[in-house]
Amino acid sequence: MNLQPAQPEKLNAWERVILPDVPGLQKIDFYLANGGYKALKKALELKPEEVIEEVKKSNLRGRGGACFPTGLKWSFMPKKSDKPKYLCVNGDESEPGTFKDRQIFEFNPHLLIEGTLIACYAMGMTAAYIYIRGEYGKWIRMLQKALDDACANGFVGDKILGTDFSTHITIHRGAGAYICGEESSLMNSIEGQRGYPRVKPPFPAQNGLWGCPTTINNVETISNIPVIIKNGWKWYSQVGAVKHPGPLLVGVSGHVNNPGVFEMPTGEPLLEIIHKWAGGVPGNKGIKAVIPGGSSTMMLRGDQLEGIRMDVDSLKAAGSSVGTAGIIVMDSDTDLIQVITRITEFYYRESCGQCTPCREGTVWMYKILKRFEQYQAVAEDIDLLMDIANNIEGNTICALGDAAAWPVQSMIRRFRDEFEKRVHESQHRVVA
Amino acid sequence: MLTEENKNKVEELRKRYPTSQALLLPVLWMIQEQEGSLSEESMKYAGSLLNIPYSHILGVVTFYTMLHRKSSARYRIDVCTNVSCMLRGSGKILEHIEKRLGIKPGEVTSDKKWTLEETECLGSCGTAPMLAIGDEYYENLTLEKVDKLLESLQ
């Protein structure tokens, strides 16, 4: 995988901390030689609540899509509990356009392990489960190797580094279900059940895995924890965008010359990312549309990208969201009808089927979009599509329904001309 | 049904989870990797090992796309056709494989060597187009690379 920007000379220097440019860092010797597990030692000298305070003040926000403040989430965990507490690390990474956590498993797995340990210490957990999508068999083995080495070196297990802190980390392999990236499905999947989302409340911090207090954090989020402890919250909170600080793994795919995963501070201009990091569009074509953060986020028009930055506030103001920071670029020749049909097919296939609006609505939208794709659409189909999307949004147990509705809604709002053109073509198409 | 090595692994895992039901996915993975698929007999075996009813196991197996009740062919080719791959030509890759093997997605060649599937995003968007055979990813595909790959697998 490509981690290098196309035009490094034109970019502000950023020394990578999540995926540092250190070959061999996946080996524990190299990791230790480069200051590895020092953040864990430092954290163990602090009180658990001081670690939570440090994360709170850093303003770290979750990197799994919802951008929820991590320290706040941690503080929801009960301090005293007669039940065990659990940490789940979400490595299900199945959002189309997202391929960042995979790089952490491959290039810096010990950072993830170190972050997991610090999180367990801060919240008083004795067990953590790292849930990884089943298709990542190769990367599961890479992380398992790192975990075995960490255990052998006394960083994981009983009485870590001679203290009273003990925790075990187990990698749990998924088996092919996008929905298991939803936190409550993920817990059901670990429990050995079908991956159906749970109704909230109760929230996981009260009633999570096996009915016990649980926190679920994304792989990249947890990998930021050692960086915060090592450098201090002050340093961290000053990297990138003020309200959404820190390093961000931005994946760029689609019509670009230099696709890859690039580590950068939050708040970088979207156009700069596309052109200077990802090398611009092949053939110097124009940009028709951009998905900024995985296929669930609202699509942006190519002519509205000026001034948009990769952070929570800027993308919200632009009518979209950071999501998983998986940018998909579409050039001026792209058939957007085909794109939205494929995206909707994805949600229809991955809907777990629990809630009627999502189960029936996604397949209905897909069938209508197929009519557009096959030049059989009528004008009323556009509003019908919008109506269905509006009736899915907010009416389901989990966010998959919203994730299916948003791309369709944003596509109709921002590219109604494409739909109207297709309706016109449907009516006036000369069949040879 | 499980090898001694895997049985030992199960005993180790029991210490990591508070319920035996949580071992279901790990045990199903072990059986599938050993046997190639999950027969009714093997699911019942998992049930007796973990004290879970067969109906529950069947419910779980049918929920997850990577758990197979039948192994249809020696090689299963998963071609990602989600957006990032689609934008970089996965349609042509799929069409090429269809022509070469003479099957459509969901079908099996008559010699039971190949089966083909269209799959959802596999997290290779930066190295698109791609396909997977088992745990192995083949990325930045061209038609020539696909030909070489198919020829290399016997």
Image: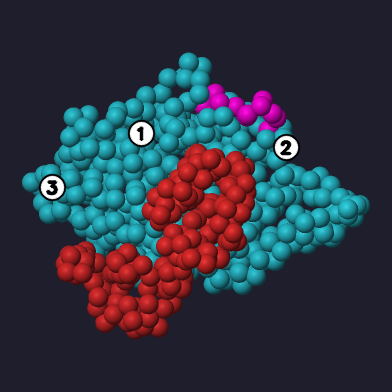
Kindly identify the amino acid type of the residue bearing the numbered disc 1: Leu
Above or below, B5 against B131 in this view is below
Q: Which residue is mark 3?
A: A152
Horizontal relation, residue A233 to residue B84: left or right? left
Badge 1 sits on which subunit?
A
Label 3 amino acid?
A: Ala
Residues rendered magenta in the picture:
A276-287
Type of the residue with mark 2: Asp
Front tag of 2 and 3: 2
In percent of the image, x 70 and y 50: which residue is there?
A: A338
Q: CA distance from mark 2 to mark 1?
A: 34 Å
For the residues labelled 2 and 3, say whether their Cβ atoms are less than 8 Å apart. Answer: no
* Residue A77 vs residue A362, the one in the foreground: A362
In terms of image quadrants, where is residue A215? bottom left
Label of residue A415 in the image: none
Disc ID at residue A333: 2
Q: Is residue A73 visible?
A: no
Q: Earlier in the sequence, mark 3 or mark 1?
A: 1
Magenta region includes residue B147: no
Q: Is residue B97 visible?
A: yes
> Residue A188's spot in the image, x, y percent?
39, 68
Dot 3 lies on which element? Answer: helix
Chain where mark 3 sits: A
Q: Relative to residue A360, is residue B134 drawn left or right?
A: left
Q: Viewer-proximal residue, A211 or B131? A: B131
B69 relative to A152 in the view: left or right: right
Mark 3 and mark 1 residues within 8 Å of each other at the beta carbon: no
Quadrant (top left, top right, bottom left, bottom right) of the N terminus of chain A: top left
Which residue is tagged 1?
Answer: A19
Colour chosen for chain B: red
Residue A280 among those drawn in magenta: yes
Q: CA distance from mark 3 to mark 1?
A: 24 Å
